[in-house]
Image (spheres, rainbow, N blue to C red):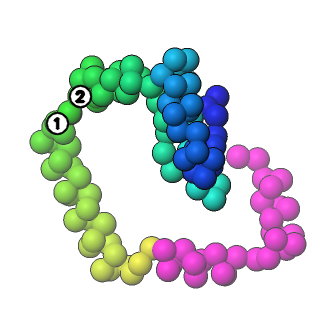
């Protein structure tokens, strides 16, 4: 587990922290007001992270999948024009449902699937 330290403390102890990550291979998360901001890592770890074998290979999407995606997006646009925004429709549907205390929900829970 990486050590977490606030920026104010880290600024006064930078040389010590840099030595710790370099010598022990540890990571130190630097945060400001409780929010992670940066990570101190040793040079060897940095080089490992930058190595070409570490990077994800670029993958090319097959043309058939791109065409299928275009067709699905076009269909979604046609449905939106025809039926309206699905999120708004869902909101209206949810408003129409009975309240959680309604016996409808108990009956539904008892129905075998």
Q: Secondary structure at mark 2?
A: loop
According to the image, label 2 marks what residue? Answer: 57
- Is any part of residue 112 visible from this angle? yes
Would you identify the image quadrant in which residue 5 lies?
Answer: top right
Determine the secondary structure under disc 1. Answer: loop
Asked if one can make out residue 29 in the rendered structure from this viewpoint, the answer is no
Residue depicted at 15% across the width and 42% down the height: 64
- Between 91 and 40, the one lying in front of the other is 40
Q: CA distance from mark 1 to mark 2?
A: 10 Å
Q: Are marks 1 and 2 in contact (CB under 8 Å)?
A: no
Depicted 12 relative to depicted 81: above or below: above
Quadrant where the N terminus lies? Answer: top right
Q: Is residue 66 left or right of residue 50?
A: left
The image's mark for residue 41 is: none
Q: Indicate which label's residue lies in the foreground, 1 or 2.
A: 2
The spot of residue 70 in percent (x, y) is 19, 57
Q: Chief secondary structure of the magenta span?
A: helix
Q: Which residue is mark 1?
A: 60
Q: Residues within 10 Å of mark 2 (few under 14, many from 20)?
A: few
Front-lying residue, 24 or 50: 24
Is 57 drawn above or below residue 67 in the view shown? Answer: above
Q: Residue 108, position in %: x, y?
A: 78, 60
Q: Identify the residue shown where x is 64% and y is 34%.
A: 3
Residue 86 location in percent, x, y?
45, 73
Based on the picture, tell me whether residue 82 belongs to the magenta stretch: no
Can residue 88 be found in the magenta stretch?
A: yes
Measuring from the top left, give residue 54's x and y in whole percent. 32, 23
Give above or below for 89 relative to 45. Answer: below
> Over which residues does the magenta segment extend?
87-113
Q: Is residue 105 left or right of residue 38?
A: right
Query: Counting other residues with Cα less than 10 Å from the Cα at mark 1, is it few (<14), some (14-19), or many (20 or more)?
Result: few
Vertically, is 41 above or below 102? above
């Amino acid at each position: 587990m990486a050590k977490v330290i606030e920026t104010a403390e880290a600024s006064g102890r930078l040389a010590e922290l840099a030595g710790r990550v370099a010598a022990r291979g540890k990571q130190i998360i630097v945060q400001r007001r409780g929010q992670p901001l940066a990570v101190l890592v040793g040079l060897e770890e940095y080089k490992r992270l930058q190595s070409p074998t570490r990077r994800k290979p670029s993958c090319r999407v097959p043309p058939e999948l791109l065409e299928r995606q275009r067709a699905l997006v076009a269909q979604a646009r046609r449905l939106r024009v025809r039926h309206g925004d699905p999120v708004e429709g869902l909101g209206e549907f949810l408003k129409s449902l009975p309240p959680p205390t309604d016996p409808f929900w108990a009956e539904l829970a008892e129905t075998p699937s």
